[in-house]
Amino acid sequence: MQQKNEFNNQNNSKMRKTYQFLMLMASIILFGCGGSSSDEPEPAPTPSVNIILRSQSISEGAEVDAESTTVLTLNYNTTVKVTGTGITLNGTAVTGKSNATTTMSVDIPLTLQEGTQYTLKVEKGAIVSTSDVNASAPAFTLNFTTKEGAKPLDNDATALTKRLGWGWNLGNHFDTSSGKDGEPTQWGYWDNAKPTQTLYTNLKKAGASTVRICVTWGNYQTADPWTIDANYMAEVKQNVDWAEAAGLNVILNMHHDEYWQDIKGSAGNNIINDGIKDRIEKTWKQIAEAFKDKGDFLFFESFNEVQDGNWGWGANRTDGGKQYKTLNEWNQLVVNTIRATGGNNATRWIGVPGYASSPTFVLDNNFALPTDPANHIMVSVHFYDPNTFTLTPENSDGKSEWGHTAAKGKYQEGSNEEHVVETFQKLQEKFIAKNIPVYVGEYGCVMHTTDRSNLFRNYYLEYVCRAAHTYNLPVIIWDNNVTGGGNEHHGYFNHNDGTFHSGMESLVKTMIKAATSDDATYTLESIYNNAPK
């Protein structure tokens, strides 16, 4: 019996082992072959759209301007939308949005600091197709930097900038010209005004620091030795005295005498040049003698906009630099003549222009700063860029808008905010940083004829003034006393008594604030972000 039980136990043990083995094999077969599909994920559906990034508004490794670069635009080959997450700028989440003008683009807003490196990342899934949410734009990484901003400067040039501040031109008054020697225009001064002490008192009260009194002398000279009419000189002196009494700085110049200052002829003929230099010297000697006892509130300016009639697009570009050399020679002659009269003229500040008073030509290597033992030379420039918007909006090529929010076709390409900043920054780098003052003797923009265009006009004037302050340039608005709208309408103050022309007080106050305020929160960026829509 015992042997039989042992046999049975052994047999049962073998059967159990066989059973366990068979169960194990069944499990392997069942689960290894996918016998239960309920626990396995569904395969991802194949997207119906292949999204490709075609272009981007900032290129890899680019250096951009922090203030004007406020958005990155990504352009795709199909319509896309932003899911709301997965976009970062230097690790901080950024919310993108669909482009307002095309459904094939995405805008990513940027808030940038000057002189900084940036990495922008767009994760896969952050931008998807509008027709198939399973179609996702590929991951994208962009590295770029921002330019260094204007460096704070503190030298004699910047101190003079603060002193000159915001200024005003007595335009179309003493600069009136008949284009003939000894023959003043029979209709009188172009501005039809009779300035008074009240004019200058009210200018000072309004916030002006400087007046530029533009004078054409040749109409009041007859022949060699080119004596200036005594009554005319007395009238000019009276206005200088009124400005002084009001506490204003004065810049006194030689303005529309270009009619006898034949720079093209002088550049090609020494005899012509010698005759003109003789007259320049005799005329400036009289002016300097008449004012040599005036204090340092008075500045002289050698010339206005000397050029051959083609505003920098004429023979000056083909004559091998002869006209530029001639103007350099004339500027030096004026400095020498003024200094030789002694008195306060020995150290008086003297402004000198480049060709056509254009920033382009003083930044050019053809411009030579006069040598001066007193080291009191300033550079004079004018700024009306773009003239199609600021001076001639009513012409066939005129423009009614300006800046980054202007409608396509209504603004001048290449002459918007970035052009202003670039021009003024270059002037600072070449001159002001080296302690040579630069001033914008004329700037402005005519009153336009529609409310919308005038919004852009106001924006332009505020932006230019703030850019000038940023780069340490005093600015002097052109005012010809003409009200209304259209070409040549530059009226801000009544030239008789200094009261504001209708609707101009607010704009003038804005320009003065932009040109002089040291409020760190009032920046080019803040103005840029409030451009007309």
Image (cartoon, helix red, strand yellow):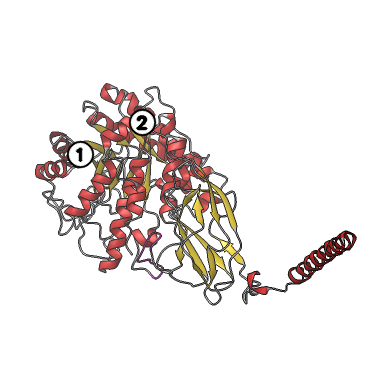
In the picture, residue 343 is in which quadrant? Answer: top left
In front of the other: 377 or 275:
377
Where residue 189 sits: x, y (%)?
20, 53
Q: What residue would you read off at disc 1? A: 233
In front of the other: 251 or 499:
499
Q: Residue at x 61, y 69 (%)?
A: 51
Residue 248 as seen in the image, left or right of residue 272: left
In front of the other: 123 or 376:
123
Compared to 281, does 343 lie above or below? above
Q: Residue at x 49, y 55 (%)?
A: 313
In front of the other: 340 or 32:
32
* Amino acid beneath label 1: Met
Compared to 438, does 408 lie above or below? below
Asked which secondary structure carries label 2, the reply is helix
* Amino acid beneath label 2: Ala
Where residue 97 sits: x, y (%)?
45, 64
Image depth: mark 1 or mark 2 in front: 2
Q: Quadrant of the C terminus?
A: bottom left
Which stretch appears magenta?
396-405
Where residue 297 sits: x, y (%)?
23, 31
Crowding near pointer 1: few (<14 within 10 Å), some, many (20+)? some
Q: What residue would you read off at disc 2? A: 157
Residue at mark 1 to residue at mark 2: CA–CA distance: 31 Å
Residue 358 as seen in the image, left or right of residue 345: right
Magenta span dominant secondary structure: loop
